[in-house]
């Protein structure tokens, strides 16, 4: 009898398996993210950073306009608040995969389990994503209470824009996670660098028209640009200053859907290829000491 | 040299009694030894240079475009570029001074520092000097690229005074890093969160992207900044010396005096905190446990 005949047939990954991995990874991610710290202190850490980032912009606007540019302030507050999600998703996915490989050295064990890495990775990074949504809510709250931001939410527009937009951001994060697995050094810095570059081109805190024209194609190709614009319309009831604000709500939603529909399959394919390459090249248990 | 590493000592006890000169030489070697990897890292790890210039530069660019969108006077672009360069030093203080002992503990180096025949202040001084040299190259690159790309013009009438203010800023800044190095270690797992907490909130309080005087609208906050935050005080003084039309919170001379006082307080504070840390290390032994 051939040796292989003795092996029990291995069933594929079921939805229940994926759900169990996802659920377990959420608990693990939360414990690691909060670093077992005091909940009160953790709340302060979570809130202080995004609030300070928004306050910097507020003071900049106040210094120049003496409180006259209310519309621009609203544009900035919403953009600054929503950008926490981009940092949360990208940072969460990349840090999770790198921490598990470099610091806790668990990546290879997760990969060899019958479960898939993908639901584990999503669950593991969810804590940071949730924290980022808390930061969004708090920044908007401060904007409304103290800075005169007038929210006129249109849920029929905002909810689909958020779901589709966050899907696009997750796609970028998944691509980044796979990419960072290939890098020998400084992989930790990539999410910050890429998120910083996207922050610059996506019209998060200033209109895209201010950018040099050579950067405009990049800005219009990024799902984050359309997500921010659609979210502003869903939250404030009007678009951004500048040319992108001239588009109709339907056009903005269409561009968001198209950019995300392109980004998601590309990101998933590249992630699968990166994982394949990582297995072949022995990168899953590589430690760079960085 | 005999088996005790000495030319004259005949017993282990004699060999252990070091002259003042030998103590000083050993500590100076420790300073140089700890500064060495940071200085040599400039050439050994070019990817660091890329990221440490790119990341502050991206942030600077975002704020420059905000001012452009607001049609702000041109000197505000200069404020942002100068502030962006100074954030490189602040990031170095937070991640490579304050959080450093915590990483060293994780890597198992801290216990070697405690047992080595030199003072921990020498290690901190080495980290500060190495970090200062390393970060200066990044800060100069941010200023150079930012100034050329965004057309910043400086009106520096007293370059030597500006250099002196910069040095006076660095002493309390790195002194603060030395103090935080001990405190971060005592606070254990909170170190990562604390390092995060010391970024955007400090950029706001330090007026990195706007004139510090704008904080006057926040009531007593400006007084707290002027008495505790060398980044804010130093930046305000440097902007007054680099841009003619800039009105500072206080005259440059007064801000220099504040920086001197801060330098003394932070370095003495660091010395006291290190003493307490060493006491804990010997008494409880928990400072050698990883991830605690």
Image (cartoon, rainbow, N blue to C red):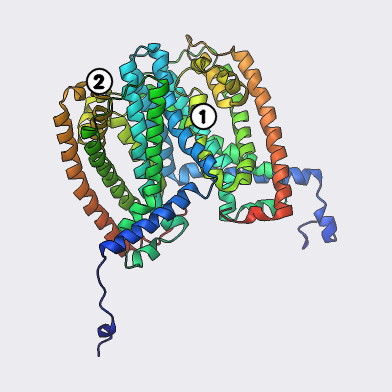
**Quarter location, residue B248:** top right
Q: Position of residue B24 (x, y in %)?
A: 74, 42
Mark 1–mark 2 distance (CA, rounded to whole Å) = 30 Å
Taking depth in this image into account, of B262 and B25 the one nearest to the observer is B262
Q: Position of residue A41 (x, y in %)?
A: 54, 40
Residue at disc 1, secondary structure: helix
Residue situated furthest top in the rendering:
B245
Q: Is residue B88 above or below residue A279?
A: above
Taking depth in this image into account, of A11 and A90 the one nearest to the observer is A11
Residue visible at 40% across and 62% down?
A285
Residue visible at 63% across and 14% down?
B254
Taking depth in this image into account, of B104 and A89 the one nearest to the observer is A89
The answer to whether residue B152 is left or right of residue B120 is left
Quadrant location, the N terminus of chain A: bottom left
Mark 1: few, some, or many residues within 10 Å (few <14, many ≥20)?
Answer: many
Tell me whether the residue at label 1 lies in contact with that at label 2, contact meaning CB atoms closer than 8 angstroms. no
Q: Label 2: chain?
A: A
**Which residue position holds label 2?**
A241
Q: Is residue A178 above or below residue B148?
A: below
Residue situated furthest bottom in the rendering:
A1
**Which residue position holds label 1?**
B202
Residue visible at 33% across and 39% down?
A86
Q: Label 1: chain?
A: B
Closer to the eye: label 1 or 2: 2
**Quarter location, residue A97:** bottom left
Q: Position of residue A105 (x, y in %)?
A: 44, 60
């Amino acid at each position: 009898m051939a040796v292989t005949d003795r092996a029990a047939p291995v069933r594929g990954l079921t939805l229940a398996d994926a759900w169990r991995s996802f659920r377990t990874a959420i608990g693990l991610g939360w414990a690691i993210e909060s670093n077992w710290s005091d909940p009160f202190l953790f709340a302060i850490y979570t809130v202080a950073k995004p609030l300070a980032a928004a306050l910097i912009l507020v003071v900049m606007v106040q210094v120049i306009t003496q409180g006259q540019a209310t519309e621009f302030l609203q544009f900035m507050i919403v953009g600054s608040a929503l950008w926490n999600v981009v940092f949360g998703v990208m940072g969460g996915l990349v840090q999770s995969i790198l921490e598990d490989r470099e610091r806790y050295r668990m990546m290879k064990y997760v990969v060899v389990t019958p479960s898939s890495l993908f639901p584990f990775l999503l669950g593991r990074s969810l804590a940071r994503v949730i924290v980022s949504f808390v930061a969004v809510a708090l920044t908007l709250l401060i904007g409304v209470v103290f800075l005169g931001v007038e929210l006129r939410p249109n849920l029929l527009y905002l909810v689909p824009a958020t779901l589709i937009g966050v899907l696009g951001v997750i796609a970028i994060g998944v691509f980044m996670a796979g990419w960072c697995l290939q890098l020998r050094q400084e992989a930790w810095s990539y999410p910050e660098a890429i998120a910083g570059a996207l922050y610059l081109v996506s019209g998060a805190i200033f209109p895209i028209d201010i950018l040099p024209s050579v950067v405009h194609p990049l800005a219009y190709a990024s799902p984050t640009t359309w997500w921010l614009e659609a979210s502003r319309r869903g939250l404030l009831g009007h678009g951004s200053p500048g040319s992108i604000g001239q588009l109709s709500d339907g056009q903005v939603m269409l561009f968001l859907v198209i950019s995300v529909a392109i980004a998601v399959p590309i990101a998933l394919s590249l992630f699968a290829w990166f994982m394949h390459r990582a297995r072949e090249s022995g990168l899953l248990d590589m430690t760079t000491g960085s | 040299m005999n088996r005790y590493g000495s030319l004259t000592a005949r017993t282990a006890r004699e060999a252990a009694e070091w002259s003042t000169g030998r103590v000083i030489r050993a500590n100076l070697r420790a300073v140089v030894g700890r500064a060495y990897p940071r200085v040599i890292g400039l050439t050994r790890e070019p990817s660091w240079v890329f990221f440490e210039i790119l990341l502050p530069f991206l942030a600077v660019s975002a704020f420059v475009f905000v001012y452009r969108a607001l049609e702000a006077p041109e000197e505000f672009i200069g404020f942002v570029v100068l502030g962006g360069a100074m954030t490189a030093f602040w990031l170095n203080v937070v991640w490579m001074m304050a959080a450093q002992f915590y990483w060293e503990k994780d890597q198992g180096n801290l216990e070697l520092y405690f047992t080595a025949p030199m003072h921990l202040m020498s290690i901190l001084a080495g980290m500060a000097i190495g970090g200062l040299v390393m970060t200066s190259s990044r800060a100069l690159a941010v200023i150079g690229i930012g100034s050329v790309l965004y057309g910043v013009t400086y009106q520096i009438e007293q370059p030597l005074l500006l250099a002196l203010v910069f040095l006076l800023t660095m002493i309390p800044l790195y002194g603060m890093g030395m103090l935080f190095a001990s405190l971060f270690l005592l606070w254990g797992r909170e170190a990562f969160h604390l390092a995060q907490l010391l970024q955007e909130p400090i950029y706001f309080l330090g007026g990195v992207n706007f004139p510090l005087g704008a904080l006057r609208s926040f009531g007593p906050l400006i007084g707290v900044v002027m008495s505790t935050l060398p980044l804010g005080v130093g930046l305000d003084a440097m902007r007054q010396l680099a841009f003619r039309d800039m009105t500072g919170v206080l005259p440059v001379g007064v801000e220099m005096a504040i920086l001197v006082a801060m330098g003394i307080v932070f370095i003495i504070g660091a010395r006291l905190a290190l003493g307490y840390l060493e006491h804990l290390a010997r008494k409880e032994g928990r400072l050698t446990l990883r991830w605690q």
